[in-house]
Amino acid sequence: MIALLPIDQIDPQGVESLLDRAFGADRRGRTAYRVRGGASAIGELSFAAVREGGALAGTIQCWPVELSCDGGASVPLTMVGPVAVEPEWQQEGIGRALMDRMLQAVPGCGTPGCRALMLIGDPEYYGRFFGFTAEKTGGWRLPGPFEPHRLLARGDEVPDCAGALGPRIRQAA
């Protein structure tokens, strides 16, 4: 049995260790880390999956980011991910349960940008199961290499503009 808890109830070092096991110790060099910069995760949308007995099985973290549109507007968004699952427990539905829990929390989220979600991920998976598309992201620029078809978004407040995506350090308390 899996319990889904707010990630702030989990030891941060345990989360970091899980991320290293799931994505490798070199994960911090990825473009996603540059996009979110030094921002703190959005607690309202970040969760951990804990197995019976207390073992950390997976996590999802969401981050405040911003799209600086070429026309001058700045639009707050939420970057979803990483979704990490302990390698030995992958393919058991833990990642999907974490995504579902995060999406359930979106309507009650008070942080700006919660209704404009974006991620870098597999379009077949995130599109089929969670409604993410690349429909509005074609003109977005990121601070590092990425595959444009993997830049996905979801939500009524996702902007349809060209611009640069980066961290939004200032966030609501």
Image (cartoon, rainbow, N blue to C red):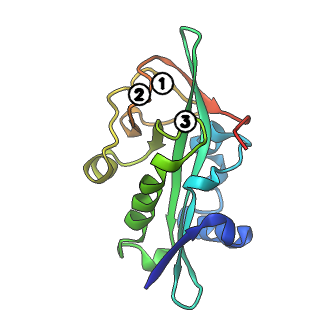
Name the amino acid, label 3: Gly
**Is 75 above or below relative to 63?**
above
Cα distance between the residues tagged 3 and 2: 16 Å
Provide the secondary structure element on which disc 1 rests. Answer: strand
On the image, the x and y values in percent for residue 123 come to 32, 45
Asked whether residue 143 appears in the rendered view, the answer is no
Residue extending farthest top: 71
Name the amino acid, label 1: Trp
Name the front one of labels 1 and 3: 3
Asked whether residue 71 appears in the rendered view, the answer is yes
Point out the image quarter for the N terminus.
Answer: bottom left
Disc 2 vs disc 1: Cβ atoms closer than 8 Å?
Answer: yes
Q: Earlier in the sequence, mark 1 or mark 3?
A: 3
Residue indicated by mark 3: 113
**Is 74 above or below relative to 34?**
above
Residue indicated by mark 2: 137
Residue indicated by mark 1: 140
On the image, the x and y values in percent for residue 64 come to 62, 40
Q: Residues within 10 Å of mark 2 (few under 14, many from 20)?
A: many
Name the residue at 64% across, 40% down: 36
Q: Residues within 10 Å of mark 1 (few under 14, many from 20)?
A: some
Point out the image quarter for the C terminus.
Answer: top right
Disc 1 vs disc 3: Cβ atoms closer than 8 Å?
Answer: no
